[in-house]
Amino acid sequence: VSYYNQNYIRSILNPDIKDKIRIITEFSKDLGYLRVDLTQIYNSIDNLIINASDAMAPKGGELFVKISNEVFQKPHEYHIYNSHETILPGEYILIEVTDTGCGIENENLSKIFDHYFTTKKNFKNSGSGVGLSIVYGAIRQSEGYIVVKSKVNEGTSFKILLPKIKELPKEIIEKQEQTKTSLEPNKKIKQNKKKSKHSDQLSFDFDIDNEEEKPVFKASSLAIAEQSGIRVLLIEDNDDIRFLAEKIISNLGYEVVACECAEDAHEIIKKDKNFTLMLSDVMMPGMSGLDFLKIIRKEIKNIKVIIMSGYSEGLINEEETENENLKIISKPFSVAELSSKIKELLNQ
């Protein structure tokens, strides 16, 4: 929760109007436990906050972000995504993002989670429409719900409900107990507390003389991996997809340098060749991703590559697809799919 302080929220708002937006936050304590992919949830909240700021352009307005406990005593039905959903009774963590922006017209409310549907066609940085569809998928994958209410010229409210688990899973408790009992007082122990990018995610490494007996406890099995020295070059001309990919990469613990065309990427690698991985779109204005792939392979030997494409993989020849340092991911992709692809390629 502390990650979403007002400074962070303001840093991700539309830069043209962020100083015209009043941010109001309300965070409860003792929220309890969730079994979710934290990277997906963080990206979902970020996406809703950014959309909210875009909806308030150019005049600005108020942005309300709330994270609290919510209890449903009986089933609650609501309409979303061309269907009726039912929120089951139980305890939930509520994440609410509300703006005082332009609102969404009734005829568009049932379409906002469709792939490539966007209401930002007249906006300066027009969106692609993939963001909300990924948010919807991430929340449903977490067995949660997302409720939308909107009124034209008054604003929009997105409410995410994620089911709580009443206590830590048995396997995590057992792992904690094993860690405690394995630490003998006659051994020299150095405790390193490593704080990840998100302040509520900590990993504790206990260094023991005998490496084979070294236990590792992570406060969350979903804690973001901390990798040092891995830098990623990202090339994507679509603003929404580039932002999403950049967030995924940075949340995995890697440093990312992002640009919107292959020509800019070429200028970057002329001065800086310290990259382990490149993510690149295929079809871009000017030089294509495949043309730049030939260039970067000459400049940086053995660089690992992920090609992002909304088209057929047939665009890439058989020799390339058999290259162990190259993976292909189809658009639109989910947070989990891209995260998995990156980890698979970097760990091989």
Image (cartoon, rainbow, N blue to C red):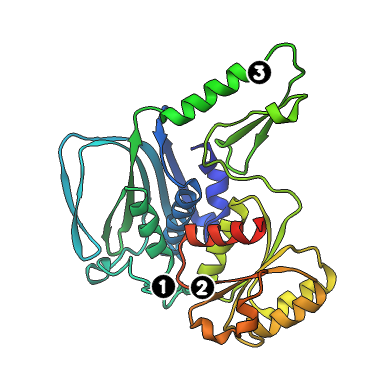
Disc 1 residue type? Lys
Q: In this rendering, which labeled residue sits more in front, label 2 or label 3?
A: 3
Q: Residue at x 19, y 62 (%)?
A: 83
Q: How many marks?
A: 3
Pair 3/1: label in front: 3
Find out whether the residues at labels 3 and 1 contact each other: C-beta distance under 8 Å: no
- Density class for disc 1 (Cα within 10 Å; few <14, some 14-19, many ≥20) is some
Whole-percent x and y of residue 69? 33, 34
Residue at 33%, 53% in the rendered image: 140
Residue bearing mark 3: 183
Q: Residue furthest right?
A: 271
Which comes sooner in the sequence, label 2 or label 3?
2
Q: Label 2's element?
A: loop
- According to the picture, the residue beneath numbered tag 1 turns out to be 120
Q: Position of residue 295 (x, y in %)?
A: 76, 81
| Residue denoted by label 2 | 125
The local crowd at label 3, few if under 14, some if 14 to 19, many if 20 or more residues have their Cα within 10 Å, is some
Locate the C terminus by quadrant: bottom right
**Amino acid at the residue labelled 2:** Asn
Q: Decide: is 273 above or below 144.
A: below
